[in-house]
Image (cartoon, rainbow, N blue to C red):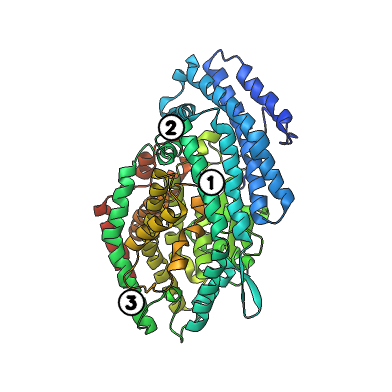
Amino acid sequence: MELNADLKKPVRHFLPETFSVTDWEAVEPYFKNLVEREISSKQDLEKWLLDMSELEAVLSEDICWRQIHMTCDTENKKLEEAFNYFVMEIQPKIQPYADVLNRKLIDCPFTQNLDKEKYFTYLRTVKKSIDLFREANIPLQAGLSVLAQQYGVITGKMTVEVNGNEYTMQQAGKFLESADRSVREEVYRKMQDRRLQDKDMLNKMYSVLVEKRNEVALNADFKNYRDYKFVELGRFDYTKEDCFNFHESVREFVLPLADVLNEKKRKKLGLEKLRPWDLEAEPSNVKPLHPFKTSEELIEKTIACFAELNPFFADCLSTMKKMGRLDLESRKGKAPGGYNCPLAETGAPFIFMNAAEQMSDLTTMVHEGGHAIQSFLTHNLELSGFKEYPMEIAEVASMAMELFTMDEWDVFFENKDDLQRAKIHQLERVITLFPWIAVIDKFQHWVYENPAHTVEERSENWMRILNSFASNVIDFSGLEEYRKYGWQKQLHLFEVPFYYIEYGIAQLGALGLWMQYKQNKKEALDNYINALSLGGTKTLPELYKAAGLEFNFSGEYIKKLMEFVRSEIEKL
């Protein structure tokens, strides 16, 4: 398979090259054309599908750019208005046409002549969309999209003052690595206090989101939003019961290992009690890890790191850099978090993150870089729908890259001791992330199974779930008020509901690929590229099989992988 990251924007065959999305009047004629066009042969159908895909790609890229610009500068009202205009004035008018086109495709007699293997997952997704479509949900979904984006606006304004200087929450996080324990505690409390200032606003927003999402589910004849969302997310290959089993497996097989790591940290720091502000710290004679100083250095070192794995991986990031598709450093007014946003027409995605010179920024960069590689690998697939891969494989792309690159991290760390610490930090993070994934996922199940809950009941059940996965080694005494609202820092709850268990499932897949990598690097990387190149053209189990993995998140499998990670940590 020839890999080429030198993307060229495809020539348009349906829309004019000069076409841009201004208003609905500019867009509607192309939908009308697709609805009214006669399809008299399989060839007509394939041409119709390509034209529809082109329109989808142009519209998708337009709304993505509006969202990117808004998250890069949440204080710019014009950017917010441009996003809201699309969501409120254009998107609601697209949806009825999309439903008509979906039905036209399924009802077309020539659809049965399409390659069944090639189109199976695509047509399955189209049928799912038909089943879910309800006219009454169009204004609800538009309002939900606008409301969810307010989370970034609120949290993007959060800053704290340390030593007379103002820092974003991401920038302030570096003080939690300070050798001075009093500084760590002071900054930790300042960050938590700042979050508490907006707790009521975020609680109120979340209550509205839950209410409206439940209404969407009821309109579509579902018992609750969880059941609706499982179908909308295309979870054809696992059930809510599988998620519950995953939670319990994490409690049984991962939590004890997390306790071992925390006890090791407590002893290493020479503390009687390990507190939340101690988790990122090192002994006083050890300096915090600083893999880079500027965002420019971060991208250059990541490119060098990727080049050691496969020149194509490095070329992907270099292409993005040339195209201006990176916004890496943290600043006031920028939305929190990090993402890789695929851009359906031009192919090269956009990476957004909040770097603050910390070790976690290195892992975020290679994580999002893994997502970016998948965007490049799927760019040449014929239809936009073929590129819509399941999130459970998308997160394998990113999480496996975190692990693959570890052998090349000498680019970031010239000192061997620092390199060793960085690898241990990464592997410990793999373990300690699982309980948090279980907490967030379990919480969402409770929230949407009980949509009429009060704010008090929400806090009570959040604490019940959080405490059931809390490490026995960490002392949380006196911090109950902070912990009660800890869920509010997880943007997925507000912006992309039920998108979180994927991280757990994918981490298992990533560890499986890393096990392959330790035995045969070339074979593991070939499997990685092969699976990602398929996009969404295969089922989830088939995509895992293409990567040389089993789609498995049973307790036995989790136990096996945790033992592997523990043995790798001990080798270091």
**Of the two numbered discs 3 and 2 in the rendering, the one whose residue sits closer to the viewer:** 3
Please name the residue shown 62% across and 68% down the image.
159
Mark 3 vs 2, N-terminal side: 2
Q: Residue furthest top?
A: 40
| C-alpha span from label 3 to label 1 | 43 Å
**Of the two numbered discs 3 and 1 in the rendering, the one whose residue sits closer to the viewer:** 1
Judge whether 178 appears above or below 542 on screen.
below
* In-image side of 280 versus 515 (left or right): right
* In-image side of 230 versus 155 (left or right): left
Please name the residue shown 55% across and 64% down the image.
195
- The residue that mark 2 highlights is 121
**SS category of the residue bearing label 3:** helix
Q: Where residue 544 appears, x then y in whole percent?
A: 37, 44
**Of the two numbered discs 1 and 2 in the rendering, the one whose residue sits closer to the viewer:** 1
Q: Where residue 563 appears, x then y in whole percent?
A: 27, 63
Q: Which mark is residue 388?
A: none
- The residue that mark 1 highlights is 208
Give, as a three-letter code, the residue at label 2.
Thr
Viewer-side residue, 493 vs 404: 493
**SS category of the residue bearing label 1:** helix
Structural crowding at the residue carrying mark 2, measured as other residues with C-alpha within 10 Å and reported as few (<14), some (14–19) or many (≥20): many
